[in-house]
Amino acid sequence: MITSKKIRRYILALTLLVFIVVEIPIIAVGQFSAPEPGDVIIVLGAKLIGTEPSTMLRLRLDEAIRLYRAGYAPFIIVSGARGSDEEVSEAAAMRDYLILQGISADHILLEDASFNTYQNLVNSYAIMKQAGLTKAIIVSNSSHIRRSLVLAHSIGMNASGAPAPMANNAYLTAKQYLREGAAMLSLVFLK
């Protein structure tokens, strides 16, 4: 007879197994990915506050600025549509932020039709092909880099990852990592 104590042990063992198999690789890739020089930096969209980038999005943009100024790539694609609760597209808000930080508008390519990570990458890859760009650096927060790279490689994009820091908020960080774990599991089960 299975007791409630045994059921709790099975649940704990299953939770630990999922953590080891799913979360540890997400954390590792987010901590140890290093960008390789390329043709373009792709900044994946995130929530806006009014017309301004949220904290998570600003961290992504600041990492893209650092890479651009260090000569990693001559162009930046900003990627993200206008959500139903947003005043402008994420891409437009990102472009404006980059311009205010001194990045020339001529070096910023706008992708404002995507509503999720997969669409960000597919649409950005189409822009790359049209512009003759062949190697990307994907910028997102460290919790999001593994899934972004898995999706990029699945569509044939030659890409490396540049993890931006997470927000200085333990609750938000834990929530983001759990969200990414669920998203990675969905990639496995939806194939």
Image (tube, grey):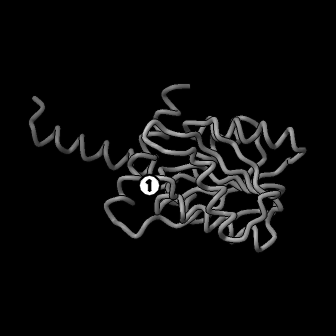
Q: Residue at x 41, y 46 (%)?
A: 179
Query: Would you call the spot at circle 1 few (<14 residues within 10 Å), some (14-19), or many (20 or more)?
Result: few
x, y percentage for residue 60?
A: 58, 61
In this picture, is 153 found above or below 39?
A: above
In this picture, is 154 found above or below 190?
A: below
Left or right of residue 161: residue 19: left
Q: Nearer the viewer, residue 170 or 74?
A: 74
Viewport quadrant of the N terminus: top left
Viewport quadrant of the C terminus: top right
x, y percentage for residue 78?
A: 67, 51
Q: Nearer the viewer, residue 48 or 63?
A: 48
Q: Amino acid at mark 1?
A: Ile
Q: Residue at x 36, y 66 (%)?
A: 169
Q: Residue at x 78, y 64 (%)?
A: 104
x, y percentage for residue 126?
A: 78, 36
x, y percentage for residue 159?
A: 74, 50
Left or right of residue 174: residue 52: right
In this picture, is 151 found above or below 191?
A: below
Extreme-right residue of the structure = 132
- Residue 151 quadrant: top right
Q: How many marks?
A: 1
Q: Residue at x 34, y 65 (%)?
A: 170
**Secondary structure under the numbered disc 1 in the rendered image:** strand
In this picture, is 160 found above or below 88?
A: below
Extreme-top residue of the structure = 191
Left or right of residue 126: residue 48: left
Q: Which residue is mark 1?
A: 49
